[in-house]
Image: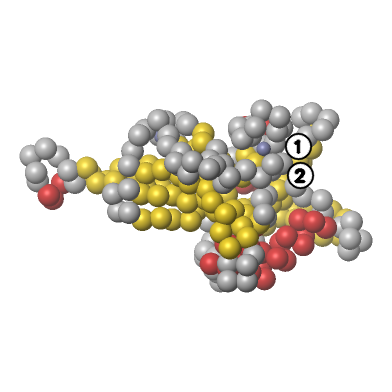
Amino acid sequence: MNQGLRDLSDSLNASVKGKFSSRKRQIDVLIDHRHDTDNRNRIIIDAKVKKRRIDVNGVEAFLGLMEDVGATHGYLVCPNGYTKSAERRAQEVVSLRLLPLDRLENFDPSTWPSCSATSRCKGKVFWDGYPSVDIFLAPLQNDFHSTNMVSYIHYVGKCDKCRNFHIKCLACGCVLTPAYDDEEDVGAQCQCKMPWFWLASIESDADGVQSAELHLIEGVKSSIRTVSRRAL
Ligand SMILES: [Zn+2]
Ligand SMILES: [Zn+2]
C-alpha cells in the first residue's frame, strides 16, 4: 500500500461486523467522517494488490462488502486496470470508484465540492473519472519537430444525493452541471473556451434499458467520448 493511503486512513486492516452477514469483515482502509450530524460518511478502500484486471464480479463483490459494512463510498484499487463491463457496473453505482494506482485521491469528504446542480441539494460530488483532452501546440516558426502537448485534465463525477453529473476543469476551475433533460441540447463549456463541450443525454440499450450518459464532444476531431453513466 502506498504511503499516501497510509497517512489518510483512520484505520488500516479494520474489522467491522457486517450488518447482513453478521460476521467480521476485513477492510484494508477504513475512513470514518462525522463533521455534522446529518452527514456521516464511511469510506472503505480495497487496496489489495490484484494480479489481474478487475472484472464485473470483482466490482459486485466489493459492492456487497460496501453494503454489508455500511460504507457510503468505496474505492477499489485496480493496479492492473479493469474491464469495460467492470467500468460500466461501477458507473451505475454513484459512490464506487475504480482507482488506478497512479492516481491519489482526496479521501476527505469535507473537501469534496458541494453539489451545484440545484441549490436545494446538500450532496457532495464524488469524482469517478478524469478524462483529459490532449492538444498539440506548434510553434510559430512551423517547426514540426517541436510541437508541445498540453493536457487539459477534467474530473467527472456525480452528486452522491441527486446523482447529477458534474465536471470540473482543472485548468480554469469551472464546475459544470449539464442537465440531461435540457431541451436546448447546446452543451456546457468551461471558461477555457476550448473546442470541446459536455453534453448529457438519455440513452437506451438494446434491451430498452435507459441510462443517463455524459459525453465529451471534441469539435476538432468530431469525436464523442462517453465519460460517465448512471441508471435512471
Ligand atoms: Zn445534488
Ligand atoms: Zn476550463
Q: Position of residue 120 (x, y in %)?
A: 71, 29
Q: Position of residue 101 (x, y in %)?
A: 53, 55
Figure quadrant of the N terminus: bottom right
**Most foreground residue, 122 or 152:** 122
Residue 192 vertical position relative to residue 158 in the rendered view, above or below: above
Name the secondary structure under disc 2.
strand
Asked if ligand 1 lies within 8 A of label 1, the reply is no
* Pointer 2 local density, CA inside 10 Å: few below 14, some 14–19, many at least 20: some
Figure quadrant of the C terminus: bottom right
Q: Is residue 91 visible?
A: no
Give the labeled residue for mark 1. 33
Looking at the rendered structure, the kind of residue marked 2 is: Arg
Q: Earlier in the sequence, mark 2 or mark 1?
A: 1
- Name the residue at 47% across, 31% down: 174
Position of 193 compared to 185: left or right? left
- Name the residue at 68% across, 50% down: 95
Q: Position of residue 62 (x, y in %)?
A: 71, 61
Position of 162 compared to 138: left or right? right
Q: Residue furthest right?
A: 22
Residue 82 vertical position relative to residue 186 in the rendered view, above or below: below
Give the labeled residue for mark 2. 42
Position of 195 compared to 83: left or right? left
- The reply to whether callout 2 and callout 1 are in contact (CB within 8 Å) is yes
Position of 89 compared to 44: left or right? left
Looking at the rendered structure, the kind of residue marked 1 is: His
